[in-house]
Structure formats: C-alpha cells, structure tokens
Image (cartoon, rainbow, N blue to C red):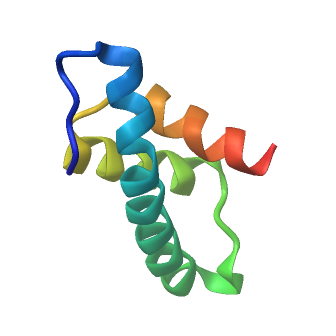
Amino acid sequence: MTKVYAIGEEMQMIVDSPEILATYDQHARAARKATPGGVLLRPDLLGVWKRVAAIHDTTVEHVRELVEGRHG
C-alpha cells in the first residue's frame, strides 16, 4: 500500500484509493458468489466495507465513499 505522509491525510486517501477499490472489488466478487442470486444487500455490503477498511487501516465511511463515488 502506498502511503504519503508529508503531503497530508487528504493526499494519502487519494493515493490509496485505487488499492482500496481493487481490494473492494475482490471481496465484493467473492461475497456475490457466496450469496444466493449474487445480489449484495446492505448488510452484505457493510461486511465487505468493514473487511476492506480493516485490511487498509482506514474507516468504513472512507471505503463507502470511494465505492459510492465510483458508481454514483
């Protein structure tokens, strides 16, 4: 994971974003395969966001904003 400390927290989040989204895609794909019908409901998404946040040492809110920002 790439971390940029000298520039500030905002820049760190921008640099980490592609890696966080790639991890999210991987975990969401696995969750869809394990879910009947392949549809992730809100509780399923929350679980994926929590796992990704823990892996990247960030907040669930940060992961959610990245994912929703990409799709919205």
Between 21 and 46, the one lying in front of the other is 21
Q: Nearer the viewer, residue 48 or 15?
A: 15
Residue 2 placement (x, y as % from top left): 22, 45
Residue 56 appears left or right of 18: left
Instruction: Kindly indicate the quadrant of the structure image that contains residue 54.
Output: top left
Q: Is residue 44 above or below residue 33?
A: above
Left or right of 66 in this view: 41: right
Residue 69 placement, left or right of 50: right
Q: Is residue 36 above or below residue 9?
A: below
Relative horizontal placement of residue 58, taking residue 43 as reference (left or right):
left
Residue depicted at x 66% and y 81%: 38
Residue at the spot 46% in from the left edge and 29% down from the top edge: 62
Q: Position of residue 57 (x, y in %)?
A: 20, 36
Residue 26 to residue 36: above or below:
above
Indicate the quadrant where residue 24 lies. bottom left
Q: Quadrant of the C terminus?
A: top right
Q: Can residue 59 be seen in this view?
A: no
The picture places residue 15, in percent across and down from the top left corner, at 38, 39
Question: Which residue shows up at 45% across the image and 33% down it?
Answer: 14
Instruction: Say if residue 55 shows up in the picture.
Output: yes
Residue shown at 69% from the left, 48% from the top: 70
Q: Position of residue 40 (x, y in %)?
A: 64, 64
User: Among all residues in the image, which is located at the extreme right?
Assistant: 72
